[in-house]
Image: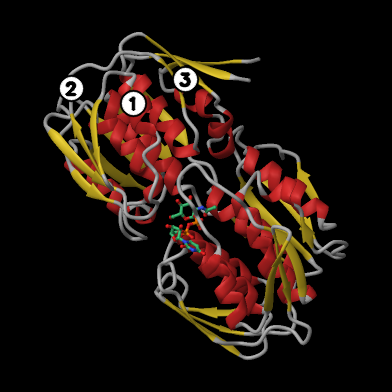
Amino acid sequence: MDRIRIVGGNKLNGTIPISGAKNAALPLMIAALLTDETLILDNVPRLADVAQLQRILGNHGVDIMSAGKRPGDHEYQGQTLHISAANIIDTTAPYELVSKMRASFWVIAPLVARMHEARVSLPGGCAIGTRPVDLLNMALEKLGAELSIDGGYVVVKAPGGLKGAEIDFPKVTVSGTHVAVMAATLAKGTTVITNAACEPEIVDVADCLNKMGAKISGAGTTRIVIEGVTKLHGARHTVLPDRIETGTYAMAVAMTGGDVLLAGARPELLQSALDVLVQAGATVTPNNEGIRIARNGAGIKSVDVATAPFPGFPTDLQAQLMALMTMAKGSSHITETIFENRFMHVQELARFGARIHLDGETATVDGIAKLRGAPVMATDLRASVSLVIAALAAEGETMVNRIYHLDRGFERLEEKLSACGAQIERISG
Ligand code: UD1
C-alpha cells in the first residue's frame, strides 16, 4: 500500500490549481442514468471515487468514454467524461460495489424514476458515523415508490412511475436532497422539497439537470420545486470547483505560512471557512484568478467553530481546522454537529504532540508551539488530509500510512504541494 512521506517546516509559496468537486462529480455522473442520451461532463477530477463510480455505472450498462487531453490543456485540467445510459441492462447495485462507496447508493433515485424499479444494497457502516439512508427512502416513498428490505438490499418499485409530492426533511441532508431532486425530475406532477440542503453541489446538479430538460427551481434555497417531465435529454456541463479542496489547501498555507494562489477557486463557495481563516490570522484575497491565501509574520490565532449545513462551516473541513488549531496561540473549541463520530483524527493528531481534549461533540484544542513528525494513519478522507496539514508544519519526518483515503478525494495532492515547496513524496508499495 502506498504511503506519503513528509518532512515538515517549509512554507508554501506558489500556485495550486483547484480540481472539480468530487461531491458534485459523483451525483452528476449518477444523474446520467436519467436519460438515454449522452451526458458530457467536463472538469471531472481524477479520483479513486470517480473510477469506482465508473465501475458501478458500468455494471448497470452505462458506457463511459473518458476523452484524452487536447492540445493546450493544462496538465491539471480535469477529465471529460461522455456518459451514455442508452440501455440500462441491470437495475441491481450489488453489495460488493455499493459497500466501497456510500454515494453509489444514490443510483436508486434515477433507476426507480426511469426504470420504475431498483435493487440497491444498503451501504453499511462508515468510519464517521452510522450514516443511515432512512430519509432517502422516505423521500422515495413520498414520491409513490414501494420499498422493502430484502437480504440487505433496498428493493424499490413504482409500477406506474413516480408521482410528485411534498417532501419535508426533518433534518438537512445532502444525500436526501440529491435523491429527492433526481427522482422528482421524471415524476408525474409537481414536487416541493422543504428544508432542502443548500450546498453548492446541489445547485450544480440542479443546473445540469435543467440543461437536460428538467424543471427545477429554488436549488440553493431550503425550498426546491420540481415540475416533473416525461423525458430528459443529453447535455454538457462543467463540474464546479472543489470547495473542500480549496479550504484544505487554504488551511495548509495558514498552517505553514507563505503565500499561495488557489487557482480557479470561488470564494462564495466557502465564505464561512474563509472568514474563520481570517480570524485565525490568515490574509485572504479573492481575485479574478481564484483566491490568494497568505500568512506572513503573524502567528495562528485560536478560533471557536461549530460545523453546520451550508452556508455554515463545513463538516468536511473540521479535521483540517483542528490540525491548524493544534499550533494556535491559546485554546480553541471545535464542535461537530453533523456526524456523531467524526473525531477519528484526534488520536492521530495527538501522535504529533497535539493537545486535544474531547467532550461529547466538542473538541478543545490547546495550541502548542511545535509539533513533531510521527508515523500516522487515518480511516477517512478528510481526517487523512488533516494529518498531512499537521505534518507540513511538524518538525522532522512524518509517514502517512493507508493513503488510499487521500486518493479517493484529493487529486495529485503530493504534486500540488511539492510544487509550492513542501517536502512531500509518495512511496509506492
Ligand atoms: C455529503 C457529502 C459529505 C459531507 C456531508 C455533509 C457527498 C458524496 N458527501 O454526505 O462529504 O460530509 O454531505 O455535508 O456529497 N442522515 C440521516 N438519514 C438519512 C441521511 C442522512 O439521518 O437518510 C444524517 C446523517 O447521518 C448525517 C446528516 O444527516 O448526520 C447529514 O448527512 P448528509 O447531508 O445526507 O450527508 P451525505 O450526503 O452522506
Q: Residue at x 27, y 32 (%)?
A: 324
Quadrant occupied by the N terminus: top right
The mark that comes first in sequence, 1 or 3, is 1
Residue picked out by circle 1: 349
Tell me: residue 159, above or below residue 340.
below
Which image quadrant is residue 182 in? bottom right
Q: Secondary structure at mark 2?
A: loop
Q: In terms of depth relative to the viewer, which is nearer, 286 or 62?
A: 62
Q: Residue at x 43, y 69 (%)?
A: 220
* Amino acid at dot 2: Ile
Q: Residue at x 48, y 40 (%)?
A: 18
Q: Secondary structure at mark 1?
A: helix
Residue picked out by circle 3: 418
The mark that comes first in sequence, 3 or 2, is 2
Q: Residue at x 47, y 20 (%)?
A: 418
Q: Position of residue 225 (x, y in %)?
A: 51, 83
* Mark 3 or mark 2, whichever is nearer to me: 2
Instruction: State the CA–CA distance, disc 3 to disc 2.
Output: 26 Å
* Mark 1 or mark 3, whichever is nearer to me: 1
Which image quadrant is residue 341 in? top left
Asked if residue 59 lies left or right of residue 404, the reply is: right
Q: Position of residue 165 (x, y in %)?
A: 56, 87
Instruction: State the CA–CA distance, disc 1 to disc 2.
Output: 12 Å
Tell me: residue 20, above or below residue 268.
above
Q: Position of residue 349 (x, y in %)?
A: 33, 26
Q: Which mark is residue 368?
A: 2
Residue 236 visible in the shown view: no
Q: Position of residue 25 (x, y in %)?
A: 60, 53
* Mark 1 or mark 2, whichever is nearer to me: 1
Asked if residue 118 lies left or right of residue 73, the reply is: right
The outermost residue toward the top is 396
